[in-house]
Image: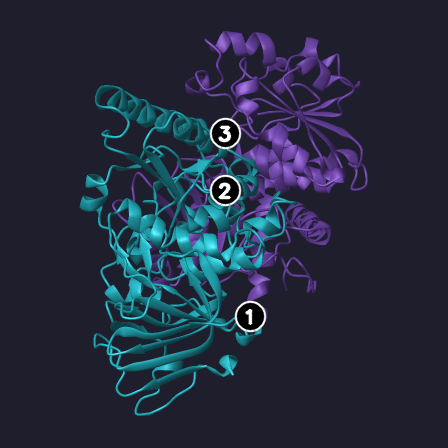
Amino acid sequence: MLTAEGELDLGQPVERLVVEGAWLVDPFSDREGAADVEIRAGRISALTWHEDQAASDGALLVVPALIDLSSTPDKQPAAAAHGGFANVVGAAEQQLLGIASAHPPLAATASAGVPATILGLPAVGPEVEVENAAQLIEELRQRAHESGPADAAPLHLAHVSTAATLDLVRAARADRLPISCDVTISQICLHDGWLAGDRRFSWTAVEAPWSGQSTDAPPYHPATRLEPPLRAPDEARALAAALADGTVSVLTSGHRPRAGHELEWPYAELEPGISALETCLPLALAAVDAGLLPLSVVVRSLTTAPAAIAHLALPPLAVGTVAQLVIVDLRAEWRVDEESLQSAAHNTPLLGHHLRGRVLATIVDGRLSWQDRAFAQSGAETREGSSALR
Amino acid sequence: MSIAGGVALELAGRHLLDVAELDGAQLELVMRTTEEARRQVTERQVPAPLTGRRVALLFVEPSTRTRTSFEIAARNLGAEVLSLDAGSSSLVKGESIADTARTLDALGIDFLVMRHGQSGAPWLAAQCFSGHVLNAGDGWHAHPTQALLDLFTLRRALGADGLRGRKMVIVGDVLHSRVCRSNLWTLTAAGMDVWLCGPPALLRGFAEWAAQMPVDRRFRVTDDLAAALDDADVVMALRIQRERMADAQLTTLDEYVARFQVNAARLRLARPGVLFMHPGPVNEGIEVSIEVARGPRSLVTEQVANGVFTRMAVLSLLAETDAHR
């Protein structure tokens, strides 16, 4: 149950907020379970773990506010806040951090596979990414050879999209090279069938990949043109497995906003990109529901793991520290549409789809940066969350 | 009175963008309507169901035959025709397809017949157009009316029930062919035993596609022309372009001719009376020998003639969907 007292205004410190019977995931101590959390004057004032996990009905999830390591910041700050993000690392910082795209830019319209063949799109295979990643790793190897592995500037491969690149990362790590990598939520949940109008998630499509007939939506949706290109469902499964086993440490939204007029070109002439900040967490939770990823891995890969690479100090979940949290109603659905999206960029093939997992509140640095309508009933001294919470 | 004569069945939707989604009943409807159009034209008794309707032909990629065929079909049905070539029209220059579609919509165009060099372009136009969009060829992807006229031509030659189990060979630049892709849907739906043949580099990805097709629609892919032609009932050659030889990993056009040209000697491997088809324009002496292209078993001129009837059929069937809107 969610109880708030006093004024709750965007941008203002949270006066008093109590979440009872929450499911709390703490990536700092690697603990999760039923807990009560109280926030007073922007700080965590009480935190009680329950021995009995039944103390949480599993409706309210509380996790640290998220960090997006290798995406494009949105012009609307509310987009990140609505997605549960506290921070989206900008392009200049990414460069300083040694973040390099695994896939070379503008090298593919589509990934080689049956959908690209049927749709008549020029396609390239995974070797384009593998060659590029191999070269970046070779440069890292040279640096490590010259200065010693401990002193070499690390490499972070962004948006790895194929199992063959993961093998290179594993080999480099075995050689003690300072390397890390991330995957986008789109590469985990979507697949190349989406180009053709298939709207099943990768875990459903892996047994029977799209083969040309039944479709849920028209083909050539402009926001299925991504970089790297969406790949076959079995690649998505390999990426999820690599995230679960730690080969990939970071999950990123891969947000790349595009204005409406940028979407009005033939598929091969489009600038790649998907608006994903606000759908990243719900999609990750869908992957958890599907048994593809443990919840603890999703939370770590969106909080402490990217923070470590970006050298961001996150306030831990402890009494006395500044509150920096997301509260999610796991049972509430919401419709992805022009109204719900805070970003001005609506380039997503999920437009019109219902997703489960509604961000009720995002609290950054003790201040409220997002509050859901259900949460923001004005004037109430005490309120409860959406009906699903009771 | 319309050509379809009040048939309750609808075409796949408001537009004709692809043939992949047409089921057996819808294909049958188009075939029967095409037959009716052929009869009406032959008897010079064509009603004019499209009187007062406007058809725009937007050909962003040049094509004389398909555009002319659509123009004649639309005029036969009584429509006004507006022809917009990429080369001559200021509408097209410097404007996105979406803007052009919106402009034509505002001008009161009812049917937008569109040819574009990029796969998927007609879907973009369809989003911005309240009338009907007909795909007259998009990139490597689809050429719906060509596949429908090919199906009609085959049914005329072999009988409406004569296609099932017959061996059909499509030989040439499969990779870059929208004609081949669309024909794969319609010919396998008709139950034909379809074989694709060409240089391996021009078949890339098609064996994987075949493997994912339902068992009863699984086509064959081979670079062995002799195996493909063995016992074939129909051979369709695709147009070969000199500039594709690098993609084909062949050094010269002569090398292609030596290995893949459809000629009389090679056709002896096929069944006696094997039929020849080609979507045009034919490079005589390249993908097919002159004697075969102009020979008695060639259906090339029938294909061209049937193109008009087929396009009349789809235009009138789409016009009928207006009644349901």
Question: In the image, A160: left or right of A143?
Answer: right
The quadrant where residue B173 appears:
top right
Q: Mark 3 or mark 2: which is in front?
A: 2
Q: Secondary structure at mark 2?
A: helix
Q: Are marks 2 and 1 on the same chain?
A: yes
First reached walking from the N terminus: tag 2 or tag 1: 1
- For the colour purple, the matching chain is B
Q: Between marks 3 and 2, how big is the CA–CA gap?
A: 41 Å
Q: Chain of mark 2?
A: A
Q: Color of chain A here?
A: cyan
Q: Nearer the viewer, residue B152 or A120?
A: A120
Q: Name the residue beneath numbered marker 2.
A: A245
Q: Secondary structure at mark 3?
A: loop
Q: Position of residue B128 (x, y in %)?
A: 39, 59
Question: In the image, B90: left or right of A28?
Answer: left
The residue at 62%/34% (across/down) is B209
Q: Secondary structure at mark 1?
A: helix
Q: Amino acid at mark 2?
A: Asp
The residue at 27%/24% (across/down) is A144
Looking at the picture, the colour scheme in use is by chain
The quadrant where residue B103 appears:
bottom left
Seen in the picture, residue B53 relative to B194 is either above or below; the reply is below
Q: Name the residue beneath numbered marker 3.
A: B176
**Residue A371 image label:** none
Seen in the picture, residue A155 relative to A210 is either above or below; the reply is above
Q: Position of residue A251 (x, y in %)?
A: 40, 49
Q: Are marks 1 and 3 on the same chain?
A: no
**Residue A53 image label:** 1
